[in-house]
Amino acid sequence: KILAAYNGLAVTAETVKGWSRDEGREALKDHDLIYVYHNVIDARGDSVSTESETFMAVEHAIEELTELSRKILLHFNISTLLITADHGFLFQQSKLESADRSILTEKPANVLKSKKRYVIGHGLPVSKEAWKGSTQATAGTLSATDFWIPKGANRFHFVGGSRFVHGGIMPQEIVVPVLTVKQLRGEKAGQRTKRKVEVISTKSTLKMVNNIQKFDLMQTEAVSELVMPV
């Protein structure tokens, strides 16, 4: 519904990866907004059998998104991409102990969803094991839905893997990147092209009197992301 209001289209990253140049242009030409869903990190981290591969999944995701962005910008007549995430995550390399668990002594009947890092329901009471909040205050929802969040980095339970978690209110979970990627052309593209740093001689004149020469050179500008050392 949200995308429809903006003449949008939702596709998976796997679908886009399989498109040829002509297929991609044909699929996207009538849409003003395209949402591409990429799910590499959660797919591994949310499973107890593969959660140890979380950071490998992060590297894999960066590599795939880089290639996907290049393909979209170069072949599908797209000029601007926004890359972001729906959430961050917490990851603990060592095995969790009982001290890492916030055991809920109260289990209300009107719970809508119960996860490791949150519980959502109606009329949740105050609990000493958790922070309580309302989605009306935090997300502007119309319904009065309450939630519990375990204090600190604790989990409510360890079922189904516990080292990779998300859904709480720690900065690592709620702060997400927003990257703008643009296809530059003409003069602007030239300004973003990598080049060697400019140098000048420290002497006013240079004289070459034999086959072996020594020169003292000085950089005229600082080395940066786009200006490379000689």
Image: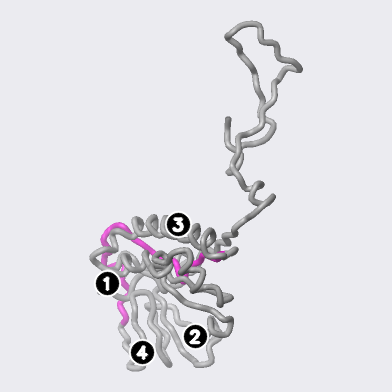
Q: CA distance from mark 4 to mark 3?
A: 42 Å
Label placed on residue 158: 1
Residue type of the residue flagged with mark 4: Val
* Residues drawn in magenta: 81-104
Whether pointer 1 and pointer 2 mark residues with C-beta atoms closer than 8 Å, the reply is no
Asked if residue 224 shows in the view, the reply is no
Tell which circle, 1 or 4, labels the residue nearer the N-terminal end.
4
- Give coordinates of residue 24: x percent, y percent: 48, 68
Is residue 110 rendered to the left or right of residue 213?
left
Give residue 166's quadrant in the image. bottom left
Question: In the figure, is residue 136 to the left or right of 208?
Answer: left
Is tag 2's residue or tag 3's residue first in the polypeptide sequence? 3
Question: Is 223 situated above or below 130?
Answer: above
Q: For the point 71% across and 20% down, which residue is it?
A: 202
The residue closer to the viewer here, 7 or 134, is 7
On whether residue 217 falls in the magenta region, the answer is no
Q: Is residue 99 magenta?
A: yes
Which residue, given by chain and number where applicable, does mark 2 sit on?
134
N-terminal-most mark, 1 or 2: 2
The kind of residue tagged 2 is: Ser
